[in-house]
Amino acid sequence: MSIDARSRPTAFRDPEQKGEAGLTSEQQAFYNDHGYLIVRGFLSQDQVDEIRDTFTTQAKSGFVEGLSDYHYKFAPGDPLSAWPRMLQPHRHSQLPLGPLTVDCILNPRLVAILRCLFGEDPLAAQTMFYFKPPGARGQDFHQDDFYLKTKPGNCMAAWFAIDPADPENGGLEIVPGSHRVEVKCPGQADLTRYFANEHVDIPEGMEAISLRMEAGDVLFFNGRVIHGSQGNTSQDRFRRSLIAHYVPRSSLELVGWDNPTLAPDRTLIELQTPTGGGPCGEFQPLRPH
């Protein structure tokens, strides 16, 4: 795998973005208590526009081998058959979206926030881009660490809203405080409502809340946090999002699909592949969830 670290014209090379600013004590405390944090207006409008236009233009060019998700087989007419999610775009240095994704997920301001939340350097392990067109199904409640199998510690997501996201167009739902529960073995999701197979029950005494995000907001959440989304019931609104998953620099194991990881200086770092199935059996994901 090659990573294109060349300087190029992009909103992410804006000199004003070079400063590193972490989190306030209030933001850190909120994350510690709830397992998630929204940083409002993190991306500039120019950055949002560049991400949206670059990914949407690539998708309109047709299926890209090794990038467009072919693991889920959608029936003709399913909105997701025309707009499949993209997997690991940061690894596609031959396409405009590859270097753009790397610039975004290793933005020094973002790395500074991740250092605050992890207490150490982050390693970028996984990226995805969801289009979620009108009529698309959602994704049932799940936990990211079930898929990434991070050890020791937990993974963390940075979820970039590229369109406004709310209940109508299938915005995220999250269970505050669920970062304190263990990784749960999932059951079967209702595939009439959700495109992926796994379902995790919400623990007794907890409940999901719907998040409302504007384009440019970034949501950070712990890999144990239970989260999901409902279908996009709007008539004409996409819910595009760029998602990156990170693991702590001290991690020793990570599922093989997500190796090698990418350090803040863009060095490739290989972690060990977990052995054995763990408490949930022999499930070994071959793709991002």
Image (cartoon, rainbow, N blue to C red):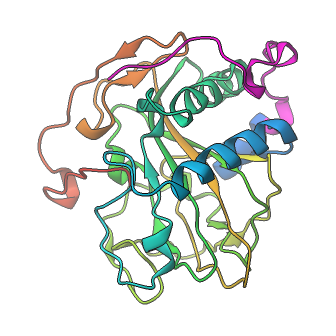
Tell me: 42 left or right of 280. Answer: right
Relative depth, front residue between 162 and 29: 162
Which quadrant of the figure contains the C terminus? bottom left
- Residue 231: x %, y % from top left: 59, 80
Q: Main secondary structure of the magenta part?
A: loop
Q: How many marks on residues?
A: 0
Residue 26 locus on image (x, y percent): 85, 37
Q: Quadrant of residue 88?
A: top left
Residue 25 counted in the magenta span: yes
Q: Is residue 177 left or right of residue 211?
A: left
Q: Magenta stretch: residue 47 in it? A: no
In the depicted view, which residue is nearer to us: 257 or 103?
103
In the picture shown, does residue 221 fall above or below 69? above
On the image, the x and y values in percent for residue 120 come to 56, 18
Q: Residue at x 35, y 31 (%)?
A: 152
Residue located farthest toward the bottom when viewing the structure as drawn: 192
Query: Where does residue 97 sit, x and y in percent of width and height?
Result: 55, 36
Residue interval drawn in magenta: 1-27
Image quadrant assignment for residue 12: top right
Kindly tell me whether residue 44 is visible in this rendering: no
Q: In the image shown, does 97 or 125 lie closer to the viewer?
A: 97
In the figure, 48 relative to 6: above or below? below
Q: Quadrant of the N terminus?
A: top left
